[in-house]
Amino acid sequence: MNIIECNADNYKHYLNFVRSIYKDNPFYKDTTSSLLKSFLLKKNAFCKHAYVHPVKVYDNGRIVAAVTFIHADYYQETLQLTYFEALPNYDQAVEMLIDYGKALCQKRKISKMTIGLSGHVNYGLGILQDHFDAPLSFGNNYNPPYYIKYFDKYKTSDYVLTSFKGKMEDFNMEGQERAIQRVCSNFTFRPMNFKDFKNEMKLYTDLNNACFLNHPFYFKRNYEEDYELFKDLKLFLKEENLIFAEENGKPIGFLLWYPDYNELIAPGKAIGLSTFVKNKLFAHRIKKYKIVEIGVLPKFHNTGAILGLFYACYQRTKGKYDAYETSWILDTNFKSKNFGVKWANEEYKHYKVYEIVL
């Protein structure tokens, strides 16, 4: 076996290999190939501030594993092993990639490696640990179950992430009227304004950088990166999908939610965002929505602002969807997880992020 660097001439081999891993999997939905392509060609805004180094492992002329190493300017202490894929029973190929990563760490004076972070948390986080036979929701990561054994033997530590799910018929805010009234008298909750899209995205980036700076895997974003990410999403998002919480006209938090667009995608197929619009696939009744991200400035954590954001989301989703799902929540984030336990019917999927300390 040998390792070959990926470049503009052979990047399609990497993409085709990823497709081959999931081609017969009825639960996988391809919503990341366009993002991965931008990393392989180093043509997205994120790559301007990061060392991106994709490689492939070949055995007798065929690819058996691939990974993209990322060393971000704002995440200097960590080398990321991202967009990993491998065939089953190729422990030697995985070991070669881990050793290759360790050599890169020595060369670039990095102290640890992370597996499960997709360049930045805004692109994805976590190696799936269970529910491999459940539908993949839009924006979440998916992987075969045998990846867990590949990584467990090398980890120094890991972080557990939990998602929640529930039925809308069981999600009600009765008994919270007084609390909601008090919160709504202190804060206002408004949808984003598409007519001022660039500035709204700046608010989103500023809030992310301020709300999540102490998150173990979050690091600084710049305006261009989030604008690039959302300009395509804007094709099928509505203004109501991003809700800002404000105090006296100043943003203090936000909630991002959207319908589970994976209900529109056939298993194993990749559909470009423009195709959603062109084919008017919105006519399909989406039954589930997803709460993707909630952030409130630390100063306002105990003010009820999060409850107000939940209520604003509830007002926009009740009667329209049958079920909901959340994105991942770190188990060490006790406040957020307890909030999920209180409002959701049950814990759902679990993920891990692995660390290898050199």
Image (tube, helix red, strand yellow):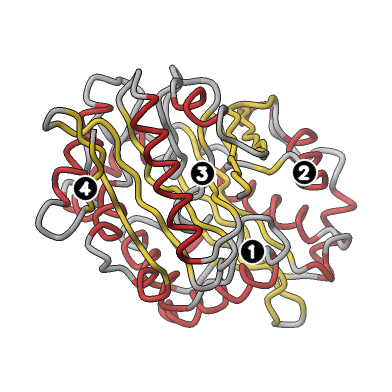
Q: Inspect the image, locate mark 1, and give the three-letter code of the amino acid beneath it.
A: Phe
Q: Residue at x 67, y 39 (%)?
A: 157
Compute the Cα span from label 4 to label 1: 43 Å
Q: Earlier in the sequence, mark 2 or mark 1?
A: 1
Assign the N terminus to one quadrant of the image.
top left
Q: Inspect the image, locate mark 4, and give the three-letter code of the amino acid beneath it.
A: Ile
Q: Regarding mark 3 in the picture, which secondary structure is present there? A: strand
Identify the image quadrant of residue 247: bottom right
Compute the Cα span from label 2 to label 3: 18 Å
Question: Which mark identifies residue 332?
Answer: 2
Q: Position of residue 21 (x, y in %)?
A: 26, 28
The residue under label 1 is 254
Q: Which residue is drawn at 67% across and 36% down?
A: 160
Q: Are the residues at dot 3 and dot 1 in contact (C-beta closer than 8 Å)?
A: no
Residue 85 appears in the rendering: yes
Q: Say which of 138 and 146 sits in front.
A: 146
Nearer the observer: mark 4 or 2; the answer is 4
Q: Regarding mark 2 in the picture, which secondary structure is present there? A: loop
Identify the image quadrant of residue 22: top left
The residue under label 4 is 4
Q: Where is residue 2 in the image (x, y as percent from the top left)?
A: 23, 39
Q: Where is residue 113 in the image (x, y as percent from the top left)?
A: 54, 50
The residue under label 3 is 115
Q: Say which of 267 and 96 sits in front.
A: 96
Image position of 344 with respect to 247: above or below: above
Q: Earlier in the sequence, mark 4 or mark 3?
A: 4
Nearer the observer: mark 4 or 1; the answer is 4
Image position of 15 with respect to 309: above or below: above
Q: Inspect the image, locate mark 3, and give the three-letter code of the amino acid beneath it.
A: Ile
